Amino acid sequence: MSHVPPEGGPAAPSLLRPRQAGMHGKVTNIELFFDLVFVYAVTQLSHTLLRDLSLLGALHVLLLFLAVWWVWIFTGWITNWLDPERLAVRLLMLVLMFAGLLLSTALPQAFDGHGLLFAGAYAFMQVGRSCFMLWALRRSPLPARRNFYRITLWLATTAVLWIAGGLQQGQARLLCWTIALAIEYLGPAMFFYVPGLGRSSTAEWDVEGGHMAERCSLFVIIALGESVVVTGSSFAESERTLDAWLAFVTAFIGCVAMWWIYFDLAVERGSRSISQSADPGRTARLGYTYLHLLIVAGIVVSAVGDELSLTQAHALATAPQIAVLLGGPALYLLGNALFKMAVIHTNFPLSHLVGLALLLAILVAAATLSVLSLAALTTAVLVLAASWETLSLRNLRRELYESTDH
């Protein structure tokens, strides 16, 4: 989105976030306040999956997760452009927060009695936020406004499908929502092409890279926070047996390893890379809009695995439990590897590749292992990947710290 002022108009539209060369906009308190709703949403998703580990249950949670991520990341893009310190933008965020809370409360019953509430809240957030941007950009150059004409038309089209799905039941609802979500996810990849209006370009998505990187890293913290909550609450309700202690320590170490893999160097390197990119909009679209999906999904699924290990430690792992216990770490390693390749421009990290290979090897014998044993093995894989990468990048870490100090 261009910040070039219109001829004869003011220097910049009053609602746009000010930009300063060499600095990135800080994440504001209202953005953090807004994110609290998604702490609850992530909790709802993990608990919904835990209650129904069937294939259909997993498919439902996947669709709901994709919707939750999409409404959050689109809001992240908006607040990247708008100044949350402005009263109108703050009011927008609070209205979206209320709608997001309604959406979150509907998640467990979204495919049952609360489908219309979920769909209505989602459509309102997507279309309403986009319409606000059209108003905020009313004095901006035509290319910036056309960008949101296209986005609004895409979201208004899918809103019809979301509401139609909310009015349906069973497979009809699933079909409508799947089509709506597929269209929305194709939008950025298709540059929001609209006949007669053409398509946008990533150059028009004038994203502030450092802010976008920080926003996405905070969502990863939200997801990790769910793991901590699940681990603590499950342990608090359990008897202090040796197995409970082992499961508790295993879950905590696994959470620390996940934090280390992403936050040790990847966040800082990613932030620097997108800030220095000649086309930050393209980098933000792939690395932060799409690939962070895998990272957050891996954490959410792993949180379900943590609760399984704390509540069913001795049970022989069933196929759904194996899928959760191995799938969470696998998604997380794959997402981090692809993110580092796309944004930091590295090769596929060998530590992550070995970790994925080890998870595949564990799968061969997984049906003969208890839930706790399987959780311990997957945690060991995450610790290995984190340690390997830390040691292999120790020289780079020293260089980054030295450049920061100077």
Image (tube, rainbow, N blue to C red):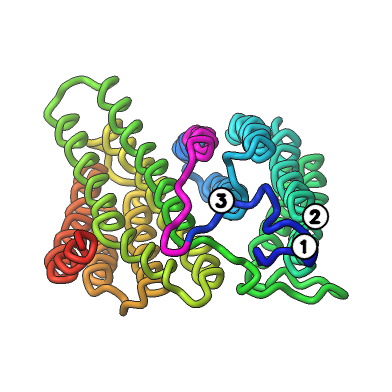
Mark sitting earlier along the chain (2/3): 3
Callout 1: 10 Å neighbours few (<14), some, many (20+)? many
Quadrant, the C terminus: bottom left
Of residues 272 and 394, the one drawn nearer to the viewer in this rendering: 272
Residue 402 appears in view: yes
Distance between mark 2 and mark 3 Cα atoms? 21 Å
Where does the N terminus fall, quadrant-wise? bottom right
Residue drawn 51% across and 65% down? Answer: 284
Q: Amino acid at mark 2?
A: Arg
Q: Is residue 391 left or right of residue 372?
A: left
Q: Which residues are magenta?
A: 21-41
Q: Considering the numbered disc 1 on the image, is that residue within a helix, a strand or a loop?
A: helix
The answer to whether residue 29 is magenta is: yes
Q: Amino acid at mark 3?
A: Gly
Q: Which residue is mark 3?
A: 76
- Amino acid type at mark 1: Arg
- Labelled pair 2, 1 in contact (Cβ < 8 Å): yes
Could you tell me which secondary element the residue under label 2 belongs to?
Answer: loop
Badge 3 element: helix
Residue at mark 2: 138
Asked if residue 389 lies left or right of residue 35, the reply is left
What's the residue at 80%, 44% (across, down)?
163
**Label whose residue precedes the other's in the sequence (2 or 1):** 2
